[in-house]
Image: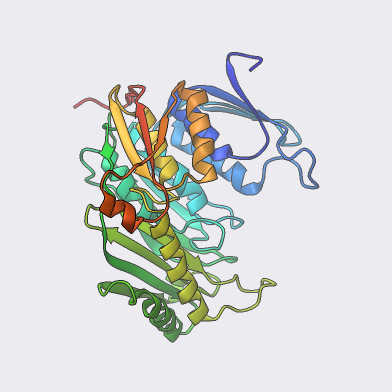
Amino acid sequence: MKNSRFQEYTGSNYLRQRLVLATLTSRSVRISSIRTREDDPGLQEAEAGFIRLLDKLTNGSKVEVNETGTQLTYQPGVLLGGRVEHQCSLARGLGYWLEPILALAPFCKNPLHLILTGVTNNQLDPSPDMIKASCLPVLRKFLLDDTGLDLTVTKRGAAPGGGGQVVLKCPVKKSPRPVQVLDQGKIKRIRGVAWGVRVSPSVANRVVESAKGKLLQFIPDIYIYTDHMTGKSSGNSPGFGLILTAETNTGTFLSAEVCSNPAGGGQGPTVPEDLGVRGAQLLMEEIFRGGCADSLSQSLAVVLMGLGPPDVSKFMVGPLSPYTVQCLRHVRDFMDLTFKLETLVREDEEDRSLKMGADKVVMTCVGVGFTNLSKKTA
């Protein structure tokens, strides 16, 4: 780091993570060499849209981007919250914006009421349903009172045309609480949603049949809802997909999802039966990885643990995803906080002989004692 005022980074990777941590810790960040060697250099439309959304959520943020878009300087302001509407780029799904905002939402000045419009479901980003099933339960563990925390899909819009809309509501908190989440538990039921827009209603039923056929070999309590939106709430493009969530007896949720190929793309049409089987297989893989947070919500748990009070927090997860590994590095840069990571060793022989999926990692840290200074005191 050449200049102590700025946290310096190069390259376009993990841009959202860096900006979110900069906002939470009020540290300025400078990111240079953004796609300098590519045919289309600089910030992409979705990344510029995320910066604009951060600007709407905060007061006093200062953003400077050079002419070519290859260097970004961000000086964070105060998180305001309130009612915010944002039209997202159709290049990415709404999950691209929702996922990082969840770490900021509880620490605004006013309760957040965020309305995002764009593509709700595509093959690249997590869908709002997936975030609701996977990330919100993890966020609830860190909030003492989660009244008012909600994520609803009011309109569904498949890629590439979009036309979807989601509403995120989140209450204001002073600080996250320390957690000790070490018991994954056993899978007790599987729930899911098979959705379809601008396709025949029978497509969703075909997806459900094939997915249940695969899952019923393991557990009897399976219920997959069908969600077939019509008219104005069905977006501009045809598509269908499946979101599956396995719930354990200790309140842990492990989720997986699949989505059909976009209309007009070069990949051709998707067979609903194949999609259902693939969804079931992805859920099996997520269950094999295990842990108390699935691979999507690991990084959210890391950030909230780091922000917690100066008390020990422990969280058990499955194998760390590359995104989480980078998140741990960024937490070290922004918060000067290092996590202790250790492989969980089973004490009893019975558990070892059962071999409960992949090796689990216990993440331990002492929080930095973050407090939300802009929260109004009652």
Q: Nearer the viewer, residue 346 or 118?
A: 346
Residue 359: percent from left, percent from top: 41, 48
Kindly indicate the quadrant of the structure image that contains residue 304. Answer: top left
| Residue 332 visible in this rendered orientation of the protein | yes
Kindly indicate the quadrant of the structure image that contains residue 41. Answer: top right
- Residue sitting farthest toward the left: 378
Kindly indicate the quadrant of the structure image that contains residue 343. Answer: top left
Residue 340: percent from left, percent from top: 41, 29
Q: Residue at x 48, y 31 (%)?
A: 21
Residue 313: percent from left, percent from top: 30, 31
Locate the N terminus by quadrant: top right
Q: Residue at x 49, y 71 (%)?
A: 278
Query: Is 25 left, or right, of 250 in this rendering?
Result: right
Locate the C terminus by quadrant: top left
Query: Is 57 left, or right, of 266 in this rendering?
Result: left
Above or below: residue 61 compared with residue 91 = above
